[in-house]
Image (cartoon, rainbow, N blue to C red):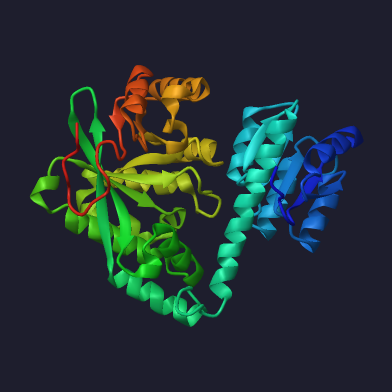
Amino acid sequence: MPQHDELRVLLVDDDPAVLRSYTRILARDGVTVETASNGKEAAERVMAASFDVIVSDIVMPEMTGIEFLKAIRAHDLDVPVILITGEPALESAVRAVEYGAFRYLTKPVAAQELWETAIRAARLHKMATLKREALELPGNDGRGLGERAALEVRFTWGMSLMWMAFQPIVGWRDRRVFGYEALLRSDEPLMNSPANILDAAERLGRLHELGRAVRAKVAAAAEAPESAGFRLFVNLHSADLNDEELYSAGAPLSKIANRVVLEVTERASLYGVKNVAACVARLKALGFQMAVDDLGAGYAGLTSFTQLEPGVAKLDMSLVRGVDADSRRQSIVRSMKKLCDELGMMVIAEGVETPAERDMLAELGCDLFQGYLFAKPQRGFTAPRW
């Protein structure tokens, strides 16, 4: 098994036997585990040192796991927190995702599940930390984003070379185009990934500027005759919900709101959004529909459903990939589709790449598909392959 160099885990539980058991599971392959017997002690440790992942019980004296998580988020919005409970309840689950828990596990937790969940969370956090640190470094022969001044130049240039690609979403049963998702692209070499542009915008405090530019470009593209009659799916960063321009009836995208589905990813926390329910009500009053993107890949699913009240749910490609040969994925997709049907939500399966995946998804009740099997994202509104 590969070494997990310098990963630091904070384990919190008021039961000494549980602490010993979980420590034995996690303290291997170079992973360092520190322990705390209650939330108050753990909060003090978090204030004094940094960790790659925190694993905490929910029911504890002095400070509950939810209160501990809230205290962490006041100090650190990024560190992944895995909450474990022997008394699962909907209220605690909702609170957990509201404050950005990475996972919510129910005791007894299998050793392998705990290990894999903790290591995945820690590695993702480590990667995100390294990416942020890279932005602080001087340029590396012009290949890095460099210091802030260079980042400003790269981002501005990237914005000037930005364009929107469109990928069709199809109804398989009727062989029809249901809509198109707008996807951010740039011809600037160091900003040719949406993740790079978003990271830079976030670091520079220019997320609203980027969001407005994306929405304006989608609105402009929607004037093309070949887009007429199709829904347009537009991704929103959670920070966009705090931008008043989004709610202006005179904004470019608002003028075609009845054709637009706004996607908010399940991977993102809505913790920093002011009054999400009121924001959603304002958007729906303009005519927009709401969608939860990447369903099954993130930690904010319950928050997304309770606060966004989406009409569309997009199944993440991690559930779709290889679904034809994986009974567990099939069971999850079938259950999610049934639940969404009961809630009156349309389901779109993303990342469909093979006929076998398509056919299995259809067998499981899905009909709306998006993926390379039908078309790659391209300039303009291209017809899918059937």
Location of residue 37 in the rendering, given as x and y in whole percent from the top left corner: 88, 43
Q: Residue at x 51, y 37 (%)?
A: 301
Q: From the viewer's perspective, tell me whether residue 230 is left or right of residue 31.
A: left
Residue 47 in view, yes or no: yes
Instruction: Tell me if residue 17 comes above or below residue 259 in the rendering.
Output: above
Location of residue 6 in the rendering, given as x and y in whole percent from the top left corner: 74, 57
Residue 77 in view, yes or no: no
Q: From the viewer's perspective, tell me whether residue 48 is left or right of residue 145.
A: right
Q: Residue at x 76, y 46 (%)?
A: 29
Q: Residue furthest top?
A: 363
Q: Quadrant of the N terminus?
A: top right
Q: From the viewer's perspective, tell me whether residue 177 is left or right of residue 133.
A: left
Could you say which is closer to the camera, residue 80 or residue 113? 113
Q: Quadrant of residue 366?
A: top left
Could you say which is closer to the camera, residue 370 or residue 245? 370
Total residue callouts:
0
Q: Quadrant of residue 324?
A: top left
Q: Residue furthest front?
A: 1
Q: Residue at x 69, y 60 (%)?
A: 75
Q: Residue furthest left?
A: 225
Q: Residue at x 32, y 22 (%)?
A: 359
Q: Quadrant of the C terminus?
A: top left
Instruction: Tell me if residue 43 comes above or below residue 174 in the rendering.
Output: below
Location of residue 221 in the rendering, given as x and y in whole percent from the top left corner: 18, 55
Instruction: Tell me if residue 233 comes above or below residue 325 in the rendering.
Output: below
Q: From the viewer's perspective, tell me whether residue 230 is left or right of residue 338.
A: left
Location of residue 2 in the rendering, given as x and y in whole percent from the top left corner: 69, 47
